[in-house]
Amino acid sequence: MEKKNSSLKSTLAVSLTNYLDAGAIVAGASGLTLWKDYLGLTEGHLGWLNAISANCLGAAIGAIIGGFLADRYGRKAIYTYNMLVYMAGVALILCSVNFPMLLAGFLVTGISVGVGVPASWTYISESSETGNRGRNIGISQMAWGIGPTIILILGTLLAPPTGGAGSEGVLFGFVKGVASLFGATGAGLHVFSSRIVFASLFIVAFIAWLLQRRLEESKEWVNLQSDTSTDTEEQTSSNKSLFASFGDLFTNRINVRTMLFLAGMYLTWNLVSSVMGFFQQHIYETAGGLSNEHANLLSVGQWLIIIVTTFFFSMIVDKVNQRWLYFIGVSFAVLAWLLIITIGVNSIAGLLVFTLLWGLQAGISVQSFYALWASELFPARYRAAAQGVMFFIVRGLSAVWGLCFVNIYGEEGEGFTIAAWVMLALLLISLIIGTAGAPETRGKSLEEITRERYNP
């Protein structure tokens, strides 16, 4: 019981990384129109903000760095310093008065998010009991839902007026009070709603830093260092050992097949999810014709569905056939996009059902299975590095797709239908790859999985 409680406690502390990951994405998304008006940005500018943010390239760069460092210096080393980088990025966004500052803030924040992701999933998996590994990954994903929910509720309460009197959020008076200290007016006043939302992330990041820096090192990583220290060849050059293990990712056929499977199922899903994470409110406001407040409220409802569904996922994932659970989750996503293409994005009924289905799929999400399987299918010596490489590929290509998406979508959403067909095709590919390649790892220890795969 003590070990189980310890596992849950460390999972909750590490899960704050997911809160801050999704929180950074949604904080940027919920205030996207406000920054666009304040700085006079175009859809191209918004595409670049998405491309280098925690949603895409920033996280991609951070992930490959973080995975490498977590295997070289330990999982705890990431938790000791990474949140300081995150706070620096958020502070830069808070102070932004031009596009380069805003872009730099998004990039630094994104890099920090990426650094923490492979270490987090690896640490949770290595510190979990065999029968609770999926549960703990699911709990960490709940934080990925709780973060956006809180951010969107806060954004709704602080929202500036979009029409006549009374269209603003109930706490917009507080925004005006803060903005008046800086003499802000017009669009400059309205963007303080977004600045305050990012300030809340700064506070959570500080709390996360205090908690995570106290975590104990992963025992599996410590044991690995003890084993390799008895090898005289590795004693002469620890760096040689590190790079040799890292190189195995691209020379070992088992590793290559595993990376192709995981990156394939995750990439095709994430290309869609990254657009939804950063542009959903913007799509609802432009193509859907909703106000900023109503777009945020609809997204809040969706994230509440995600939290409940993710909790359900965490309770059953260690007990049911994971292949079929994956199939059911992605099927919801396919149905959601098929529906929105059929009914139309400017239909309130269509948006409501789409929001429900997308929330259900995100609760039983591809990301949850990716986090679970990626931390199970590689040996400890390069477990985080492998995740970092794949996360780099996925988020990097998501950045490219984000730039393509804004050009297909158009300034006011005139190309939404074409983009939606592309989304549907990507989700079908993810459904096929993940269902066909789902591994049989449930109920097995990490050591047992490694022996079966690499020492049959």
Image (cartoon, grey):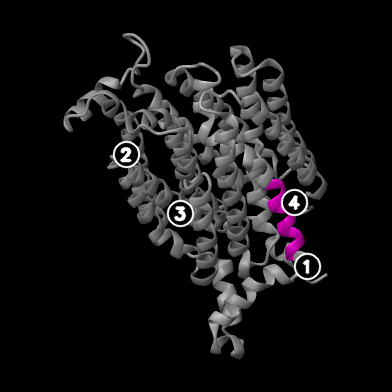
Q: What element carries label 1?
A: helix
In the rendered image, the vertical position of residue 161 relative to residue 299, given as above or below: above
Q: Distance of mark 2 from mark 4, alpha carbons?
A: 40 Å
Which sits in the foreground, 348 or 202? 348
Q: Name the residue under label 1.
A: 253
Q: Name the residue under label 3.
A: 111
- Pick whichever of labels 2 and 3 is earlier in the sequence: 3
Q: Is residue 443 visible?
A: no
Is the residue under label 4 in contact with that under label 2 (CB below 8 Å)?
no
Q: Distance of mark 1 from mark 4, alpha carbons?
A: 23 Å
Amino acid type at circle 4 is: Arg
- Mark 2 Cα within 10 Å, few/some/many (few <14, many 20+)? some
Q: What stretch is highlighted in magenta?
A: 255-266
Q: Name the residue under label 2.
A: 199
Amino acid type at circle 2 is: Ala
- Pick whichever of labels 4 and 3 is earlier in the sequence: 3
Amino acid type at circle 1 is: Arg
